[in-house]
Image (tube, helix red, strand yellow):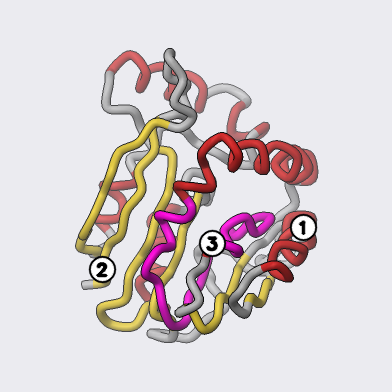
């Protein structure tokens, strides 16, 4: 298997089943807000089954969607066909993106930085492919800001959750990692999704934009 391919067959099939219901439950609105105002050339990291594709505004001229899991790439092609923008889906991994230096206007990370093996490396790659002044858009579930839920996240991450969740880790401080990678955060909002009465370990999310320095 080449370094551009990853196999999570059980998780991939589970995700294609449950993600549409998550969108109906509010994730689609977060996706729309994540992508609003984008234009030019965009690279989406870990595009999965392509649920972002129909939310890209018409001002986007091209989306290079990078996804290492073959089942998810195949599912993504169906959503790409419904998009109003041109989408190319290619194999690749977050810490070795198939794009030239300073070649895109924006990089989109949506529910992927929780699961990449090397989060810092993925963010360095995002900075590399962005043109000077280009934007990183992110929608990610992150470490909780309350001690009790953060402890529950650490416990979950120390069990079989990463294996079941396609490498997902619930306790990553992704906002801090974005800043450490040299990005200047322009907007960051903390949201709870799903917005249940009792928050789940995967409920704390951030959505926002950061500029390449």
Q: Nearer the viewer, residue 59 or 75?
A: 59
Contact, mark 1 vs mark 3 (Cβ under 8 Å): no
Indicate yes or no whether the magenta region holds residue 73.
Answer: no
- The alpha-carbon separation of the residues under discs 3 and 2 comes to 21 Å
Q: Quadrant of residue 209?
A: bottom left
- Is disc 2 surrounded by few (<14), some (14 to 19) or many (20+) residues within 10 Å? some
Instruction: Name the disc covering residue 211, or none.
Output: 2
Instruction: Name the disc covering residue 132, or none.
Output: none
Q: Is residue 23 above or below residue 202?
A: below
Contact, mark 1 vs mark 2 (Cβ under 8 Å): no
Q: Secondary structure at mark 3?
A: helix
Q: Quadrant of residue 6?
A: bottom right
Q: Is residue 206 above or below residue 42?
A: above
Which mark sits nearer the N-terminus, 1 or 3? 3
- The alpha-carbon separation of the residues under discs 1 and 3 comes to 16 Å
Q: Which residue is mark 1?
A: 75
User: Residue 190, how many percent across, how many down?
Assistant: 30, 38
User: Which residue is depicted at the point 72% across and 67% down?
Assistant: 2
User: Which residue is depicted at the point 43% across and 23% down?
Assistant: 154
User: Residue 34, how many percent across, how many down?
Assistant: 41, 56
- The alpha-carbon separation of the residues under discs 1 and 2 comes to 31 Å
Q: Nearer the viewer, residue 113 or 186?
A: 186
The span shown in magenta is: 31-54
Which mark sits nearer the N-terminus, 3 or 2? 3
Q: Quadrant of residue 124?
A: bottom left
User: Residue 7, how many percent across, how many down?
Assistant: 75, 52
Q: Secondary structure at mark 1?
A: helix
Q: Which residue is mark 3?
A: 55
């Amino acid at each position: 298997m080449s370094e551009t391919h990853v196999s999570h067959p059980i998780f991939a099939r589970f995700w294609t089943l449950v993600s549409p219901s998550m969108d109906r439950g509010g994730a689609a609105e977060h996706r729309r807000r994540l992508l609003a105002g984008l234009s030019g050339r965009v690279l989406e990291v870990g595009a999965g089954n392509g649920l972002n594709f129909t939310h890209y505004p018409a001002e986007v001229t091209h989306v290079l969607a990078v996804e290492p899991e073959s089942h998810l790439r195949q599912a993504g092609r169906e959503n790409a066909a419904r998009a109003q923008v041109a989408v190319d889906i290619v194999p690749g991994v977050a810490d070795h993106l198939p794009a030239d230096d300073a070649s895109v206007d924006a990089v989109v990370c949506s529910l992927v930085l929780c699961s990449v093996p090397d989060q810092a490396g993925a963010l360095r790659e995002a900075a590399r492919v962005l043109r000077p002044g280009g934007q990183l858009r992110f929608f990610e579930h992150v470490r909780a800001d309350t001690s009790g839920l953060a402890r529950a996240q650490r416990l979950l991450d120390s069990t079989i959750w990463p294996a079941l969740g396609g490498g997902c880790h619930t306790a990553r401080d992704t906002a801090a990692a974005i800043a450490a990678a040299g990005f200047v955060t322009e907007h960051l909002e903390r949201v709870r999704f799903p917005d249940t009465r009792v928050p789940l370990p995967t409920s704390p999310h951030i959505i926002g934009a950061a500029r390449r320095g």
